[in-house]
Structures are given as structure tokens and as C-alpha cells.
Amino acid sequence: MWLFNQPPRALLRERYNFEITEGFLQNLQRSCVRFNSGGSGSFVSKDGLLISNHHVGADALHKLSSTGTNYLRDGFYARSRQEEVPCLDLELNVLQSIEDVTERVNAAVPKEASAETAHEARRKVIAAIEKESLDSTGLRSDVVTLWKGGAYHLYRYKRYTDVRLVFAPEQQIAFFGGDPDNFEFPRFDLDICLFRAYENGRPASTPHFLPVSPSGPREGDLVFVAGHPARTGRLLTVAELAAVRDLTLPTRLSWAKQREVLLASWSARSAENARRAADSLDGIRNGRKARDGQLAGLLDPRLFAEKTAAERAFQARLQGTGQFPDALRAYEQIADSVRAASGQARRHLLLETGFGFVSESFGIARTLLRAAEERAKPDGERLEEFSESSKASLELELFSTKPIYPDLEILTLGDSLTLLASELGSGDPLVMKVLNGKSPEERAAELVNRTRVREVVFRKQLYAGGSRALAQNPDPMIELARLVDAQARSLRKNSEAQDEVRQQAHAAISRARNALAGTNSYPDATFTLRLSFGTVAGYDENGRSVPPFTTLGGLYERSRSMGNRPPFDLPERWVKRKSRLNLDTPLNFVSTCDIIGGNSGSPVVDRSGRFVGIIFDGNLASLPWDYHFSQEQGRALSVDSRAIVHALAKVYNTKDLVRELVPGYR
Amino acid sequence: MWLFNQPPRALLRERYNFEITEGFLQNLQRSCVRFNSGGSGSFVSKDGLLISNHHVGADALHKLSSTGTNYLRDGFYARSRQEEVPCLDLELNVLQSIEDVTERVNAAVPKEASAETAHEARRKVIAAIEKESLDSTGLRSDVVTLWKGGAYHLYRYKRYTDVRLVFAPEQQIAFFGGDPDNFEFPRFDLDICLFRAYENGRPASTPHFLPVSPSGPREGDLVFVAGHPARTGRLLTVAELAAVRDLTLPTRLSWAKQREVLLASWSARSAENARRAADSLDGIRNGRKARDGQLAGLLDPRLFAEKTAAERAFQARLQGTGQFPDALRAYEQIADSVRAASGQARRHLLLETGFGFVSESFGIARTLLRAAEERAKPDGERLEEFSESSKASLELELFSTKPIYPDLEILTLGDSLTLLASELGSGDPLVMKVLNGKSPEERAAELVNRTRVREVVFRKQLYAGGSRALAQNPDPMIELARLVDAQARSLRKNSEAQDEVRQQAHAAISRARNALAGTNSYPDATFTLRLSFGTVAGYDENGRSVPPFTTLGGLYERSRSMGNRPPFDLPERWVKRKSRLNLDTPLNFVSTCDIIGGNSGSPVVDRSGRFVGIIFDGNLASLPWDYHFSQEQGRALSVDSRAIVHALAKVYNTKDLVRELVPGYR
């Protein structure tokens, strides 16, 4: 997960005799696309055509669907550019430049200040840097915290907000095998989705793009993955990791499983329920399986023993030099901070993160409430999501015309109010105010039925009118958000102060590490562009050798062996057109590339920078990679470019699309 | 939920002009059958034929099935008595007599003793009473605690342990609509299962049985339900109820939902997985939906306000008389005891109840370990499940040849060890000993693969050999049970002492209530035979009137409207033989009878004591009945006797069976 401004030149030279050029890097960087909704992708033609995963596009497909039209389940193909469907609130980011602003950020933070003051000063200078950059370049400008506080880099992105759907296969082939086969290998998924970026009403010109290789990769090939891994915790101290293992992961898992049961049982009640909840339920199931694997990894005492030994060895080394008292102190500070934060962690998740009020309506209501308060403040004093540099993205999301389903809102809000009451106790004063003398379900129904925040016009009116408009248009959901806000903000303030403590401590550790071990390392993932590399390679599992490729023939065989029952059934097109296919075509492959959630949709490129596949998953053994990378059994899963081209041509008859991807095809 | 020895004569006379006779009561009592595995049933012929629910019989059907034979899913019909299949470890109980032993029990408990001493004395006298009764009558003899300590009655049962499967429909029609329609009405389920009790290798002679009415009940009819409601908490004080709402139910629900996700996702991986986990998964889903409804009821502040007002009013009345200082003090004692128990509740559930070690193997291992220790003690000093009076039932279960699936064992044990580590913390000394330096999954695999407790011969050998045999045959699962046992026993001891405190307190309240309000009330449910009554009646739901009956025609219509998709698909037989059916035949009906979990399979009888239906569920509004009974919308659901007879004759061609149920049919 290397930074594009600090690529692993020496490593690549030594291990693979590969000289990474500026041209290679620059074309890859500018071809890569970040889905602001979560995920990665890449341009694959000069006319703004881009490819990502079906499960990354699912959010957009879900928002475009309605009772009559189910793009998520049934797929879509625009036979002409006129048929390409504008997505509702999709923002894509393409990285243009990176600038190190560490010195400026740290210089603005007074020494010996309280954590709270330090955090405020840091927030202020970051807002100023972002705003200056936005004003001077017009580009989206984010200051990113790296090495958990060791460095601050300014990332500038070109934004695309007119993004149109070009092609999606049926979910049944994109996510063949469903939850049972998720994070498993061998695998047989055509997990792709194609969009086109537009500018000024016309397809964007994208001179930087990845030419699609119709010949895919071979076993043993060196391949690169460029994408946006969301978050790792590999640099966490043992104290932090223990809190993840014993508190954060179990809590999140327990709540996610409760929501999974809720949505699964509601979905079973009707096909329309299933359609409405599908995107949420898929996401929850995916997160559940991922976190189960992460927790299993952290509960393996060998992983912890290794982490502990490494930490102790490093501390001993620090001690030996006598030069890094602040780094040694940092471990204690982090442990203290973890303890301080743990006591409030569940309340924070419920009230501030919002697990107590799960619904689109509450999210909108809180944004409206806070926008009124925050936008009245100077830029540098606002909560970061209301800064001037975040304004455009915030408004894109806030004013989205995406469908919101009151029945689903009542269901999830009622369930999460039940969780709130169970976790904090029905006698908690805030819980009693929130429920207002009603049962959770009744209160949820009242709030959802009476709020007007689902009307976009109403949102715009309140947003423009600020606090006065809120006072003139009392809305029950906004009043609920207001009721909770004092405690929620106070929890956030404390939590941000603890983050600052840990950030400073990690900065000290980072300085010591760089001084002792050099700067040849990569920071934890931060949903920013990273480069990883590896080879196409199978692995051994319980003495069984798993080869690196699966084929289209394997897909049909898997379906047959599972009785063609959901989720192992095939779309009608695939059944009918089987005879047109070369069943030896590689479908999925595994590589040793380092990936993590957020990398979904990342292009896999070969030595010459050609697109040979697309990341869509990792295997079970890769799940602990969030906290510890190991290539022993862990593998990244990709769809092979050969299967993509072959299926588009033979199953979907998308000849124009194929020719745009592979000029001169057939 | 009236006691058979204190039936509501006056109420029935006043409200329904019905004179309940000894003959009516005695025939009903002796026709009723308790499934020791949980559930109710009744004899419906003089030759030991008995009917219960498919979901009550599910445990037996599951145990009789194997990879090739799926009785649970596919159903079964014995065309002759020779084909009737002996169940593996099914024990049925038929109540013969009830004796009030309150005075003897209380006299044996020293006044002013510590809770622990009092509990031991109570345990001792109860064991003695049971043993004496068993020796003198040969009948299963259980002393039952009623009114949470207000009275002790000795129940004597005839035991049947040679029980054979006669008929089961396909699960798809027994549980049509599955989880989505569970606890809902209108409903369309043929939730029945027929067994035959045998004695000395021949069909038992059962002169007391319920004649099946081929004409069912009519709207407005007075009907009776006799069965074995498992457990209610209607007499809980407000302090106890608050703990159920804020601690017990949320904890159990959260854990059950986690297990549901585990089993559902494992089941999706293959048809054989699904078969192996089906009975557990159905049970968990049923319990989850029931508890969700109970929690929703308790989170309705009106229910609590009502309970609180009633408690305060009663306390004021007590205060007014000046005669019941012990009853007034009892409320405080209960509240203190609840607080004392709450701190240890989760640890108790994990270590003693066994939620940390979910697997058949662990249960067997613990029984073997404890049997060796307990059987060496005098009867009155043993844990109650090892008393002489429980011996036969314990051995029936312990030596069952039921199938145990190692893969499923590893799955559930691994998951529950993960829960254990998450709940108690990975650094908890006992957790560390339990995991023994391995990850939960690895440890589970090691334990399940190496234990021999799945071999019945090994179990018998260890059970017979006691502590010495255990020492000579060290088994890893038994050693795990031993590792946990000191803490588990200590938690149980504390918990039993707290139970004693509350039992004495409730006895004081009960005495005061009887003195002030008379004894015309029923105690909370205790999985003993109870009588309830009501009328066949629809209800209003959100202004919509729900009629009391559904029909066979409604079944086909429901299936069609849900696209015939699982769980709304129909068994092939039902599709093919539709034309043979009178579609107007009533299928399910609702009544105002008071039922609860454990009542499943209870006969519904009319004024003349004829079988007119069988209880199989309650509607959503009935779920809070565990804590508060209301006939406003809550209803009991039954299968109509007309549908049973019609389906057996027309869909299943079980002519002999029909003639045994309805002599002279057609």
C-alpha cells in the first residue's frame, strides 16, 4: 500500500528487476478513479469510460431503481450514449497531485497545548490549507493524515459529478455464489460495472486511461494494483489492537448481525421488500463476513504474540539509543488514551456515529441541523465535514433525489432505537427523552411519517435558510437530532481530543521509526490512492493446492454441483448462451497483491501498464490483512480481463462497448 | 393458565354458563401429553395415537434423519404399525396426580438461615419428597414451585419412552410461510405430527383420549386449551421486569441473532449443511421472533406504567393494613437480589448455562463430569438434575444415539468460544485457559475432533465408572468442562442463593395477596399442565377487521400471491391434489385462549371435550403475553380439526389413520 509519491522503487528493482518509470506511475495515477461512495475504479477508454465492480456500483444501481425497475438485480446496457443513465449523487475523484504539508500543519499546533486546543489548532490550519488550495486550483483538496500523525499530505482531485451508467450485468453473475462464496476461492464472479464520466454534458476526455489487455495475466506474472484501500490498522500499538479485538470489533459485529437478521427477515416478506433492502443487506453481509475474519485473525494468539514481540523489540531498541524518550512515552500515552476512550465507545457509536438512529432521514436531519450551526462559524472552527473544501461534496449528497422508503426507514429506526434503549438502559434520561413516552417502533413510525426531510425542496429551503428556517419549520426528525446533539457533540469532542493525543504519540513513534529504520515504508490505508504489487499465484490450503485461475467452465460446474439453487443459479442469458462461450476462458484469478476494503474495483495492471483484471475481493485468509499482512495463504481476487471481454461480446452482445475497450476487437 | 387442581369454576359459570365437571377435567388431564423435549400434545385414540405440532416433533424428526433421509423436510407416513419408527430419546409425560406439599417443604427450611443454607435445605426436602414418591408409585415425581415460591405441588407423571413416529407432513406445509409468517395471522399451516406411545412393545392402551371432531369449532364458541406453557413472568416485580427488559432479553436476543447469522450462512453453503442445521436454525429463528416481540412489549412504556401503578397500589394497600411488613420488605429484597445477580448474569449465561460452549459434545462432557461427582453425594445434596427422581430421564437423554455432526459442532463451538472471548475479554484468565494458546476456531476443531463423547459406548463406560473412569480416560472435552466447572458451579451457587432470596420474598407477597385478594388466581407457567379458555374470535388491527378462520383456498391464494417462492412454495402433493380438496375447509383459526411457548401442540377442545383443533402459535400481539396478558389483539393460533382430517384423507391418502381418528369416517 505504497504512496504514489514514495513508490517502492528499490524493492521492485531488487525483487522483480522492474524499473518503475514516471510515465508508468503518472498514467496509472490519472487513470485511477475513487468512488466517493466507497470503492475504486479506472478509466479504460479516452472517452471517460470507466470500470469498477458491480458491488461498488451497487449503490448507484440501487438509487436508480424503483418498484418497476431493478437495475441491481437485472443489470443494464446502454446501446447508445443517449441511453446512458445519469447517476443520482455519484462523485468520482481522480488524483492530480500530492504535496507534503507536514511542517506547516505541525508548526500551527502550539507545543504543550491541551489535546483539545491542539486539535482545534490542527483542524484550523488544515481547513486553511484546503481552502487555499481549492480557491487557487479549483480542485477538491483534502489534507490526509498519514502514519497516524507522522505526516500530512495535501491530495488534490479532479471531481466528476456527472457520471452515467453504461453497463451492469445481472447481480446473479456479478455476485454468483452470494454470501456463501463471498471471500472464498475458487470463485466465479463477473463483478464488473461500467460508467462514463461526463463534463459539460459530454463524455469526458480522459487521455490517461488503461488499455485493456485481451490476453490477461499468466501465472507468476508481476502485477500491480492501484486503488483506494479504506482503512488498515497495521501500525496500531498492541494496546490499540487489543481494544479493537475486545471492544470495537465484537460490538460492531454484534450490532451488524442484529441488523442482518432484521433486514433478512423483512426481505423475506415480499419481493419488493427484498429489492428495497438489497443494497443495505448485501453491504451488511459483506461487512459481517469481513469482520468475522478480522476478529478470528486477532483472536489467534500467534498474531498477537508476534505484534507484542515486535513492539517490545522496537521499544528495547529505542531504550538502547536513549534518544527517543517521547516515543517510549508515546506507548503509555496511547494505552491511557485507549482506556479513556473505551468507556465511552458504545455511547459514541450510538449517539454520534448514529447506530442508535439508523435511517436516511435521521442522517439528513442531523446534517441540516449541524449545517445551520456550523456554517455560521469561521471555516477553521467547523466540524470538518462542513468546511468550505467539503461543501460541494456535502451538498451533492444532501440534495440527492435518491429514493428513501418510509417502511424501511421505520423498520431500521425502530430497531436501532431498541438497540439504543437496550444498550444505554430504558431509564437513561436521554433515552427517555428520545422515546418520548412511546415504544421504539411507535416512536420510529411517528418520526418517519411526520418528518418532511425526504422532500428535497424542503431540505434546500432549510439549508439555505439556516437556523432561522429551522426555527420556522419545526420538523420532528430535526428536533430529535437537536435533542441528541449536545451529548453527541460532547462525545465527539472528547473522542477527537483522544485522537489528537494518539496522533501526537504516533507522530513521535513515527519519527523514531524513520530515524532508526529509514522512511522506506508505507502508512496505514486512508482511502487515498496506493500502489501495491505481487504475482499471480495459487496457494496451499490444508495441504490442498489451490490453482490461481478459475474458468467459465468452472462457473457452470459450480452451479450444477449446487443444484442451480440460489445463490448458485445462473441468469437466463448465461444458460442460453453457454454454447457461444469458450469455457476455458479464465474467469477469476488470485494474486499476492496487498489489498483491503476500498480496493474493490481497483485495476490490476501488468508491467506495461495494461489492464489485465479488476480486484473484487480477497480470500478468507486475507481478512486479517486489516491488521497484519501475510502472503502465506492470503490472496487478492480479481476478474480476468479475458472473461470481461469475452462475456461482453458473447453473452451481452455489447459490440460497441467491446470495441471501445479493445479497439479493433474481432 | 389455571391449575388443574384449582380450575376456574366460578369464572366459567359466570361468563359462559359452563359447569366444569370432574369427568371433563379428568379425561382432559389424562389425554394431555407433555413432550419432555419441550411442547404439548394429546392422545386422540384409545390405542396410544397422539397428535402434536410438526415443530414439536421436529426434534425427533431431525434425530431420525440422515444424509439420505430427511423426515423433517419430506415428511413420513407409516402405512402399518410395523412401519412406525421408534424415536431416539423422546420422553412423554402424562399427569396422573397433583399433591400440595407446601407445608412440608417450608417446614424443612430453617427460619433465619442464610439464603445458601435455606436453598440447600429446600433442595434436600424436595429431593426426599420426589424420591419417596418415585419409590412408592413408580411414577415420575416432580415438586413444582408455584407462584414463584408461594406454593409447592408434587406432580406425578406416567412416562412413555417408546414413542414411534406415525405421520408427519412436509415441513413446507407444516411451516408454510416460514419465518416471515411465523407469529402472524392470517396463517395457513398444517402444523401437525402424529406419534404412537408404546408399552412393552405394543401400542399403549389409552382409555383417556380426545375424540376428534370432524366439524371443528364455530366463531364465538367457548373452547379450552390444555397444555404445558413453559414459563411466564407475569408475577415478576417491576424491578425484576426491568432487568428482563434491560439485560436478559437484549443479551439473549443479541446472542441468538449472532447464532442465527452463523447457522443461516453455513446452511447456505450446501443442502446437507442446511439439513444438519435446520432444526437448530428453526428453533433459533422462532425464539428470536418471540423475544423480539416480548422486548417490544416491555419497551412499550404503557405496559411498564401499568405494572408500576398496580405494584404501587398493592403496596399502598399492604401499607394500609399494617399487617404485611414482610411482603413490603420483599419488594426491596427482590430489587437488591436483582442488582446482585445482574453483575454476574452474562458470565453465568456463558459459563453455567453454556452459551460459551455451544455444542452437543460439551453438553455431554459436562453431564459425564458432573454425574461422576454428583452421584457420589447423598441424593438431597446433588444438583437437582442428578437427583434419583431425575435419573431415568437423564440417562435416556445421555445415552441417546442421535446423530451429532462434527462439522456443525466445530462451527457452533468455535463461534461461541469467540463470544466467550469477546464478552469476558481475551485477557480473562479462564478464557486464556480455555483457548489454551489457540484461536477459537482452531481450539474448537481440536476439541471436537479429539473427544470421544460422541461414542455412546464410551459415554456409558464413563458414566458407569464414575470419577475413576474419567481419570483413566482423559478426554479433551471433559477436561474443558472440568476447567470451567469451578467457576460455573460457583456462579450457579450464587445464583441459586439469589433465587432463594427471591423465592422467599415472592412467598411473602403471595401470602399477602391471597389474604387480601383471595386465592382465585393462577401462578406463572412452569412447564406443567394448565387449563385456559376463551372463544373463537377475530380481532381488529389498525382499523382492519381480521376474521377468525382461514381456509385451504386461502393457502393456495397466499402461495400464488407470493410467487410460489420459498418459503411460500407448496409441496408437490398439495399442488397435484388441489382438485380433490374442498377449498372452503377451515385451515387455521384464532381464539382468545391464553397460551405461551410450550403450549405448542396443545389440544383445543369444545364444551363436550372433543378435539376441535391444535394450538401451534400466537400472533404478534400475543408475544408480550409472557409478561402481561391482554385479549385486545393477542390471539392463539390453531390448526382446525376439519383441515387435519380433510388433508389426511385427501392429500395424504392415510385412510387407516383417518378412521382411527374419526371412527366410521366416509
Image (spheres, coloured by chain):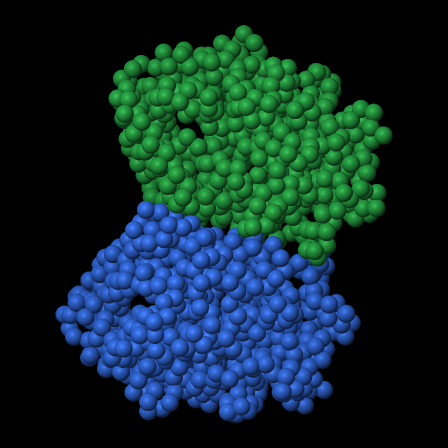
Chain colours: A blue, B green
> Residue B393 location in percent, x, y?
56, 22
User: Horizontal placement of A211 versus A599: left or right?
Assistant: right
B599 sits left or right of B189 in the view: left
Q: Nearer the viewer, residue A587 or B226?
A: B226
Asked if residue B64 shows in the view, the reply is: no
Residue A303: name its quadrant. Answer: bottom left
Residue A441 location, x and y as percent?
46, 52
Q: Quadrant of the N terminus of chain A?
A: bottom left
Is B76 located above or below residue A262 in the figure? above
Count of numbered badges drawn on the protein? 0
Q: Residue furthest top?
A: B136
- Residue B548 in percent (x, y) is at 64, 41
Q: Residue furthest right?
A: B666
Task: Give the camera-side residue of B44 and B83.
Answer: B44
* Identity of the residue drawn at 49% across and 9% down: B132
Kindly give the residue lying farthest to the left in the view shown. Answer: A112
Q: Quadrant of residue B312?
A: top left
Q: Say above or below: A25 vs B138.
A: below
In the shown orientation, is residue B450 left or right of residue A558? Answer: left
Q: Is residue A67 left or right of residue A8?
A: right
Q: Quadrant of the C terminus of chain A?
A: bottom right
Identify which residue is drawn at 39% across, 66% down: A475
Residue occupying the point 72% across, 69% down: A574
As drawn, B412 above or below B229? below
Residue at the location (41% across, 87% down)? Answer: A96
Q: Nearer the viewer, residue B268 or B99?
A: B99
x, y percent for residue A33: 48, 81
Q: Is residue A387 visible?
A: yes
